[in-house]
Amino acid sequence: MPAYKLDNGKWSASFYYRLPDGTLKQKFKRGFETEDDALRYENEFRTRAENPCSFPFSAFVDVYLADVKPRIRWTTYDTKRLSIEKWIKPYFKEKLLGDIEPVDVLHWQGWLDEQRLKNGNPLSPTYVRKLNSDLASLLNHAERNYGLKPNPMKKVAKTGKTRSGEMQIWSKDEFNSFLDAICDKAKSYYAFDLLFWTGIREGELLALTPADFDFENRTLTIDKSLARKDGEAIVGPPKTKKSYRKIAMSEFLCEEIREYIELILKIGPDERIFEGMTKSFLCNEMDRGCRLSGVKRIRVHDLRHSHVSMLIHMGFSVVAIAERMGHETTDITFRYAHLLPNSQGVMADALNEAKSAKKVG
């Protein structure tokens, strides 16, 4: 089918193609600068779709990444791209897509087990699991959209772990010891204070502005997150739709953050209160504070787990905690099930009382 010129001057390609199993599908893509670009895309796409098995794996990686890029957050895309380029593409690059067998996947899994990071440590079980999922997503995409059959990943069990080991958290006393150790740097002190007492994510913290705080009503609005791309700080939407939320702040925390913002001279309502701070800086400060205080080393993200743990032990409901954290209720239940009180015994006792209760009248 011909290419079409759009009202904005760009060109689009709209055409039908047939998968190897005979299925007829339609493809539409816009945004080409010239008609030749649109027609070239159609020809290349037809070649890929109608002969997927003869496509080099390394070339299909580029196709897959281009296909998924518009549908996922750019931070997710960058993470996926870097993982595939480093740990998947180099291993399979010499093979044709259709030549990859289940045994090749097994050998790749074994190869991952042998790899070492710069510090000499092996890849973590959770990262290995993520890489397995990345390869599965790529091959599933080839099967679903380009007719790849059979899909070798479907006959191989994923390796690694979906969750890391025992969750690391701090008690209030451990956090206070840590905070005392870094009080010489005001920006660090208030940043970690917010992380522990609100449970917000690092990216959410780094994107905060004075306008996000309503000290009169003691609330904090989370509607953005900061990430870095090629060294540049970019403020975008938060992680998920659930991440848009208002967090109630304690009175003491309101006073502390109000004092901190007053310390920052000439800051506008929409300027970041932790301007210049990075996740690497937070990580280095975590190292410094743990070394000086002697408390066990946890990740910065574990402060979020510590906040949830504290709320659970205070007796708050899973629904209320999920709303505060910007999570689904099922996520809280699954991740923190080991911390939740076991209500089965209470239920059994209540049923016993109901059974033995005498009728009135």
Image (tube, rainbow, N blue to C red):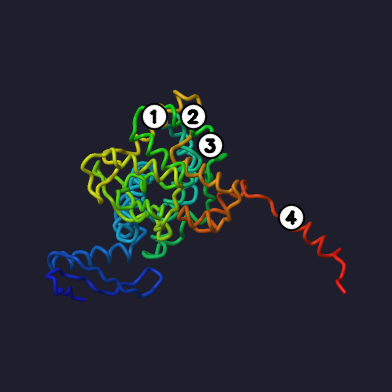
SS at badge 4:
helix
Viewer-proximal residue among 189 and 73: 189
Name the residue carrying label 3. 172
Q: Are marks 3 and 4 in contact (CB under 8 Å)?
A: no
Left or right position of 175 against 144 = right
Q: Position of residue 113 (x, y in %)?
A: 48, 37
Label 4 and label 2: CA atoms lie apart by 37 Å
- Amino acid, disc 2: Ser
Residue 57 seen by the camera: no
Name the residue carrying label 4. 346
What residue is rendered at 17% in x and 65% in y?
32
- Amino acid, disc 4: Val
- Amino acid, disc 1: Cys
Label 3 and label 4: CA atoms lie apart by 28 Å
Crowd tier of the residue under label 2, counting other residues whose Cα lies within 10 Å: few below 14, some 14–19, many 20 or above? some
Residue 70 seen by the camera: yes
Among numbered discs 2 and 3, the one appearing first in the sequence = 3
**As drawn, which residue projects farthest toward the front?**
216
Among numbered discs 2 and 1, the one appearing first in the sequence = 2
Name the residue carrying label 2. 177
Among numbered discs 3 and 1, the one appearing first in the sequence = 3
Q: Are marks 3 and 1 in contact (CB under 8 Å)?
A: no
Q: Which one is in front in this view, the residue at disc 3 or the one at disc 4? A: 3
SS at badge 1:
loop
Q: Which one is in front in this view, the residue at disc 4 or the one at disc 2? A: 2
Q: Position of residue 41 (x, y in %)?
A: 21, 64
Label 3 and label 1: CA atoms lie apart by 16 Å
Crowd tier of the residue under label 3, counting other residues whose Cα lies within 10 Å: few below 14, some 14–19, many 20 or above? some
Q: Position of residue 123 (x, y in %)?
A: 46, 37
Among numbered discs 3 and 4, the one appearing first in the sequence = 3
Q: Which mark is residue 183?
A: 1
Q: Which one is in front in this view, the residue at disc 4 or the one at disc 1? A: 1
